[in-house]
């Protein structure tokens, strides 16, 4: 018996000695050195992609840019219930002097394709979302009309302007337009965009599998009885939730006791089935902690560091075995989460394809006056950009029918019911959509081009996030002049100097050459008015035909200047149909709502249309000269001259400026 007692005393003395003296940390290093060592040992790069059904895509990260395969909406549509008509037929209309229009024998409910052309003096009943018929260029609300059942006519009680209550094809998303960027976290709003494009599946980055273990004899799982001296394991639940928040897939492995053999077996199993292993507890080298001893037996290179100059968080330990990192967090929850967010979150987000997490302020000043209706609280979707006086809130121009307005918004602010609007420069509180995602590094405003979509995608691969807002060349230049963006995308021709873009720059602006695009007349193949003719001759033939209908472009766009030159002051049928994009022009012609318009060659080809070249235009990028030191802008400007960019532009049918100089 005495021998057994002696052995028990010796074992207790050994345990007492271990508990009474603490081993030193391997080497306490600075936070920056520890992070650098971690990054050098394990690549912080995104995982491969996988394709998932749309219903399983929520919370996932896009593995590549998504371009809309269709126009959204796919046709010009009515934004209200009313009557499709020609705006010129309503001139000077009022309650005392209504304009009577004969109703066509057709009712355009949603899903009905028009068959009757709206001739002068006629109108067609149309529902909200109904397809605008050929000949019509506006819609009058049903509330502003009176139906005469005896004569099957409608009295219009108010004048309407061209394009009033018309939503143009591709106004929300244009066919071929990049609508979602690689690295975007898919939320309900992105699901809506993908569904609106008709996509049933999407390519996403595989989620990193993160094994989560808690170590310690004192730990008890939540829901179990709590013995004296024990504590509930909160770290496991917190860490697993944080992994999910940052794009990972947590694999809960529960509680492992302070037994070296059991812990080693658990770690070896976790390394086989996961991309990262996270333990909490076992770093302080106090009594019962064995994690650091086990780590040294799992394989090379083993422990990278144990001890970081942080408070809290000094006991942090990181090792690498079998090509996978093992992070042992301190046991105290505050220390565990501090070090988790500092060291683990950047790695998980990098594997998941997410940008670095960033918490940001939300105070901003409105870039322009925002009118609002008295008596109603209005929520205004806004994008955020850095202006000369701080953060600016740029109200998005798209309306309530737009899917992209919600997707592109960084947040929204409220205009109170007692206010008639918010004045330019006024401070607002922007409610952030999607917390923890950094604001864009670069804001580009101006004329849309699929070539710029590609350049922005390449910029994203270099770690810079760009926000793009399409308002036309003149709108982009005005935004740059007001300091609301970093880059203005433009293609404006000055007839006095016969030069593109440079004559329009204000003092302090610089111009980066972009690429050349071929503009021309687009038409349906087989149309004898255009086939076999030069562009100018074809347009002259169309202008001489009273049945020919054109589709114009919005004022302020570079293409509109070209169209105005062709028309030479005339206003043929369709003149007031003025969509904002090349795609909308092509869609109108392709669907027979117009016979001709002006667009770029690549869009004509995408829609299967005939094309007669007019001119090769310069699509360039303007920026403030004093902003060249901005890292994102500098990277963007470098990218314009790189061979990879030139090759991508050529693949899209464009001529890089450097090759045409």
Image (cartoon, rainbow, N blue to C red):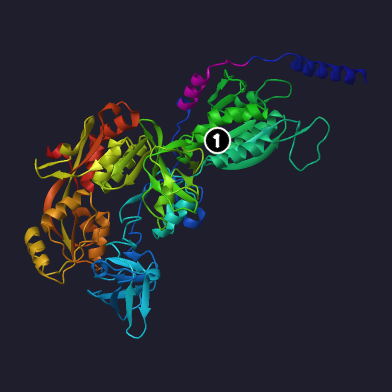
Above or below for 196 versus 440: below
Q: Nearer the viewer, residue 202 or 271?
A: 202
State the residue at coordinates (32%, 68%): 94
Asked whether residue 31 is drawn in magenta, I would say: yes
Above or below for 41 versus 547: above
Q: What is the quadrant of residue 155 in the picture?
A: bottom left
Q: According to the image, label 1 marks what residue?
A: 276
Is residue 205 rendered to the left or right of residue 98? Answer: right
Above or below for 534 versus 115: above
Asked whether residue 559 is drawn in magenta, I would say: no
> Could one spot residue 559 in this view of the protein?
yes
Does dot 1 land on a helix, a strand or a loop? strand
Q: State which quarter of the image contains the N terminus.
A: top right
State the residue at coordinates (33%, 67%): 158
Residue 423, x across and y down, in percent:
40, 42
Q: Nearer the viewer, residue 284 or 658?
A: 658
Q: Residues within 10 Å of mark 1 (few under 14, many from 20)?
A: many
Residue 660, x across and y down, in percent:
12, 40
Residue 492, x across and y down, in percent:
18, 44
Q: State which quarter of the image contains the C terminus.
A: top left
Task: State which region is magenta.
Answer: 25-39
Is residue 189 rendered to the left or right of residue 601? Answer: right
Q: Characterize the magenta stretch by its predominant secondary structure.
A: helix
The number of discs equals: 1
> Could one spot residue 269 in this view of the protein?
no
């Amino acid at each position: 018996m005495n021998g057994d007692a002696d052995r028990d005393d010796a074992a207790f003395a050994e345990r007492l000695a271990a508990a009474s003296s603490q081993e030193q940390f391997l080497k306490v290093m600075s936070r920056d050195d520890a992070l650098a060592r971690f990054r050098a040992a394990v690549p912080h790069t995104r995982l491969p992609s996988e394709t998932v059904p749309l219903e399983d895509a929520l919370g996932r990260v896009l593995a590549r840019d998504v371009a809309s395969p269709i126009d959204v909406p796919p046709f010009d549509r009515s934004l209200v219930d009313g009557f499709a008509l020609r705006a010129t037929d309503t001139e000077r209309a009022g309650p005392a002097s209504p304009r009577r229009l004969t109703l066509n024998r057709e009712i355009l409910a949603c899903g009905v394709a028009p068959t009757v052309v709206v001739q002068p003096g006629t109108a067609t009943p149309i529902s909200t979302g109904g397809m605008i018929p050929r000949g019509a260029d506006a819609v009058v609300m049903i509330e502003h009309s009176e139906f005469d059942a005896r004569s099957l006519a409608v009295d219009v009680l108010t004048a309407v302007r061209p394009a009033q209550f018309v939503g143009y094809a591709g106004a929300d998303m244009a066919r071929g337009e990049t609508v979602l960027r690689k690295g975007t976290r898919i939320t309900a709003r992105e699901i809506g965009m993908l569904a609106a494009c008709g996509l049933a599946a999407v390519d996403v980055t595989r989620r990193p599998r993160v094994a989560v273990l808690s170590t310690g004899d004192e730990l008890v799982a939540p829901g179990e009885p709590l013995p004296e001296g024990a504590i509930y394991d909160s770290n496991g639940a917190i860490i697993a939730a944080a992994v999910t928040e940052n794009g990972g897939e947590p694999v809960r492995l529960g509680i492992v006791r302070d037994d070296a053999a059991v812990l080693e077996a658990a770690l070896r199993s976790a390394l086989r089935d996961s991309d990262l292993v996270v333990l909490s507890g076992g770093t302080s080298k106090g009594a019962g902690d064995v994690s650091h001893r086990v780590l040294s037996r799992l394989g090379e290179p083993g422990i990278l560091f144990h001890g970081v100059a942080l408070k809290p968080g000094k006991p942090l330990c990181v090792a690498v075995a079998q090509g996978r990192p093992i992070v042992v967090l301190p046991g105290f929850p505050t220390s565990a989460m501090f070090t988790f967010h500092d060291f683990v979150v950047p790695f998980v987000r990098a594997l998941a394809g997410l940008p670095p997490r960033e918490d940001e302020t939300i105070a901003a000043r409105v870039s322009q006056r925002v009118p609002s209706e008295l008596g109603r609280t209005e929520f205004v979707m806004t994008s955020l950009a850095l202006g000369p006086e701080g953060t600016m809130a740029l109200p998005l121009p798209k309306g309530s029918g737009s899917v992209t307005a919600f997707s592109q918004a960084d947040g929204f602010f409220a205009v109170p019911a007692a206010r008639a609007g918010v004045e330019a420069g006024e401070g607002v509180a922007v409610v952030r959509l999607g917390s923890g995602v950094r604001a864009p590094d670069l804001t580009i405003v101006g004329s849309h081009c699929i070539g710029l979509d590609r350049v922005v995608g390449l910029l994203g691969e270099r770690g810079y996030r760009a926000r793009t807002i399409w308002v036309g060349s003149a709108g982009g230049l005005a935004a740059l002049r007001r300091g609301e963006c970093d880059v203005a995308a433009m293609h404006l021709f000055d007839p006095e100097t016969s030069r593109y873009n440079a004559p329009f720059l204000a003092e302090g602006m610089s111009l980066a050459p972009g690429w050349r695009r071929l503009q021309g007349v687009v038409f349906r193949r087989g149309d004898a008015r255009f086939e076999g003719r030069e562009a100018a001759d074809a347009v002259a033939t169309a202008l001489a035909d009273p049945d020919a209908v054109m589709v114009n472009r919005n004022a302020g766009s570079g293409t509109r200047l070209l169209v105005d030159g062709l028309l030479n002051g005339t206003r043929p049928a369709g003149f007031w149909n003025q969509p904002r994009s090349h795609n909308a022009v092509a869609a109108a012609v392709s669907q027979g709502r117009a016979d001709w318009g002006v667009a770029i060659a690549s869009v004509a080809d995408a829609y299967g249309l005939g094309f007669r070249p007019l001119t090769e235009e310069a699509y360039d990028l303007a920026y403030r000269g004093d902003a060249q030191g901005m890292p994102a802008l500098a990277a963007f400007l470098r990218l314009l001259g790189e061979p990879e960019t030139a090759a991508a532009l050529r693949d899209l049918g464009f001529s890089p400026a450097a090759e045409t100089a």
